[in-house]
Each structure stands twice: as structure tokens, then as C-alpha cells.
Amino acid sequence: MNLAVTFLLFLMFSFLGWLIEEVYTYADEGKITNRGFLLGPICPIYGVGALLIVFLLEKYNNDILVLFVMSTILGALLEYITSYLMEKIFKVRWWDYSNNRYNINGRICLSASVIFGFLGVITVYLLKPGLSALLYLLPKMVIIILAIVLALVFITDIIISGNVISKINKVDLSGARDVTDEITNRVRKTLTKHSFFTRRLANAFPNFKVKLKKLKK
């Protein structure tokens, strides 16, 4: 695969991941919420995971059980590392599986990892071949132009969304104790008072928790 096709596949996988999140949220809460960190309808963690599975695990396509197990492990590692890094960067626990059975530090749980395993199998056997075939129906120049345009949109979204997330670290926490729930409530109230974009972030992650070890006096 060339770079343009790989990037378009990343966006398509990310969009499908966003759809999965939307369906799950609607089934669980009965409402539609724009999930994910970005403003657009994509969840990049699914795109990254799908590409990792394609590049690292596609060679196991002759053994569906091995592919499933490896996809489960890879998905769990990706979700754990992503959760850890984002908490270190933004001081926020964006999702928490502490109430789920068989979880590790609330960052991953068995049920979510198994879902990644099934998605890995579906990706290798159905999604990657099907989506690649659709893309290659387009002229090469169209693929390149489409990739460039969408890359510019994607980068713009990252910049805007990054600015929104940065507001979390700008919330006035004076007078707040070093208690996760109190800090989280202070941040959530502040976010909901800002623009549509900050309210969207608060709604997309209703269970996020702000975790600061030390507060500035």
C-alpha cells in the first residue's frame, strides 16, 4: 500500500470505530454523542489499531484463532498505553473500567479487549480487503488529492481539539482539595461554560476524571 491509501484506510477505520462508539453509547444511554477527542466523526485509536493489526498480524490470516488472540493482546496494549500517555499528558483519566470485571488499573478490561480481538479478525478478513478494493477503483490522482485534502482537515481538527483539551489545565483550581471528584467537577463545570467545542468534549467523555497529585497554591 502506498502512503495515500494507508492514510485513507486509517481515516476509514477511524470512522468505523467512531460509529461503533456511537452505537454502543446510544444502546447504553439512549442518546447520540459525538465520541472521541476530535471534532470530526473519527476515533483515531481505532484507525491506529486497525493498521497495526493489518501490518503486524495479517500474516496470521490462515489461523483465525491465533489472529483473534493476537488482536486481543494488541488491542489491550494499545488501549493501555494510550490511556497511560493521555493521563500523563493531560492529567485526565478519559475512560475508566474500574467497575468492569477483570480490569487492569481501570485502563483496560477483558470484555473490551475481546471486542478488539473480534474487530481484528473482521478487519483482516473483511474490512481491509473490501475498503482497499474500493479505494483502488479510484484513479491514482484522485486518491492523492483526496488524501491531501483530508490530511489538511485532519490536522486542522487536531489543532482545534488540542486547544480545547488544553483548557483543562487552565481551569482555576484555587481552593480545591486534592480530591479527584472535586477537581473533576470543577473542570466539568468550567468546560460546560465555554464554547460548543468544550461542551462537546465534556459530553463525549462523561466519565472522565481529573487526577492531580499536587495543586499549585
Image (spheres, rainbow, N blue to C red):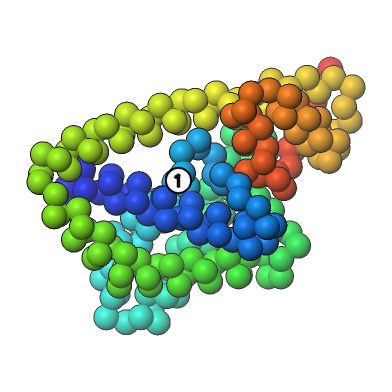
- Identity of the residue drawn at 32% across and 82% down: 63
Q: Quadrant of residue 102?
A: bottom right
- Identity of the residue drawn at 48% across and 66% down: 116
Q: Quadrant of residue 204?
A: top right
Q: Quadrant of residue 143?
A: top left
Quarter holding the C terminus is top right
Relative height, residue 203 to residue 50 (above, below): above
User: Tag count in the figure?
Assistant: 1
Q: Which residue is mark 1?
A: 42
Residues 169 and 191: in front is 191
Mark 1, other Cα within 10 Å: few <14 / some 14–19 / many ≥20: many
Q: Position of residue 126 (x, y in %)?
A: 30, 70
- Identity of the residue drawn at 42% across and 75% down: 68
Q: Position of residue 195 (x, y in %)?
A: 64, 23
Residues 32 and 94: in front is 32
Q: Position of residue 22 (x, y in %)?
A: 55, 54
Relative height, residue 36 to residue 68 (above, below): above
Residues 170 and 42: in front is 42
Left or right of residue 126, residue 213 in this image: right
- Identity of the residue drawn at 48% across and 61% down: 75
Relative height, residue 65 to residue 73 (above, below): below
Q: Can see residue 85? A: no
Identity of the amino acid at label 1? Ile
Residues 35 and 120: in front is 35
Q: Can see residue 168? A: yes
Q: Position of residue 160 (x, y in %)?
A: 49, 25
What is the secondary structure assignment of the residue under circle 1? loop
